[in-house]
């Protein structure tokens, strides 16, 4: 995700927390990157999984994302 998109996402997150008078966990993409860089490496295994849309498909043209599988 681009730095600009991360910042936009954090702004949306902050807006959703404003009514509770809470802050998002990161101020900006720079804050996020610094946190990642400061995280110690350990023996935690990486895990991944696959997701796909499982709802009803519309009649006619089916958008490609409805048939795709995504690795997370």
Image (cartoon, grey):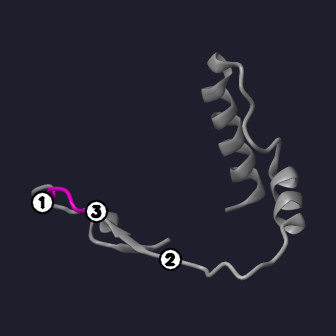
Q: CA distance from mark 3 to mark 2?
A: 17 Å
Give the percent coordinates (x, y) of residue 66: 28, 64
The residue identified by callout 2 is 48
Extent of the magenta region: 53-57
Disc 1 crowd rating (10 Å Cα; few below 14, some 14-19, many 20+) is few
52, above or below 14, in the image = below
Q: Is residue 55 left or right of residue 8?
A: left
For the N terminus, the quadrant is bottom right
What mark, if any, has residue 60 been given in the picture?
Answer: 1
Q: Report crowding for label 3: few under 14, some 14 to 19, many 20 or more residues within 10 A (C-alpha).
A: few
Q: CA distance from mark 2 to mark 1?
A: 33 Å
Residue 52 position within the rendered picture, expressed as x and y whole percent measured from the top left? 32, 67
Q: Going by the image, does 7 lie left or right of 72?
A: right
Name the residue that disc number 3 marks. 53
The residue lying toward the viewer, choosing from 71 and 35, is 35
Answer whether labels 2 and 1 touch (C-beta < 8 Å): no
Give the structural element (helix, strand or loop) at label 1: loop
Q: Farthest residue in the left direction?
A: 59
Between the C-alphas of marks 1 and 3, the distance is 17 Å
């Amino acid at each position: 995700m681009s730095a600009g998109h991360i910042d936009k996402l954090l702004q949306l997150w902050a807006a959703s927390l404003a009514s509770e008078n809470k802050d998002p966990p990161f101020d900006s993409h720079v804050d996020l990157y610094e946190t990642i860089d400061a995280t110690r490496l350990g023996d935690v295994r990486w895990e991944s999984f696959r997701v796909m849309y499982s709802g009803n498909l519309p009649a006619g043209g089916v958008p490609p994302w409805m048939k795709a599988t995504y690795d997370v």
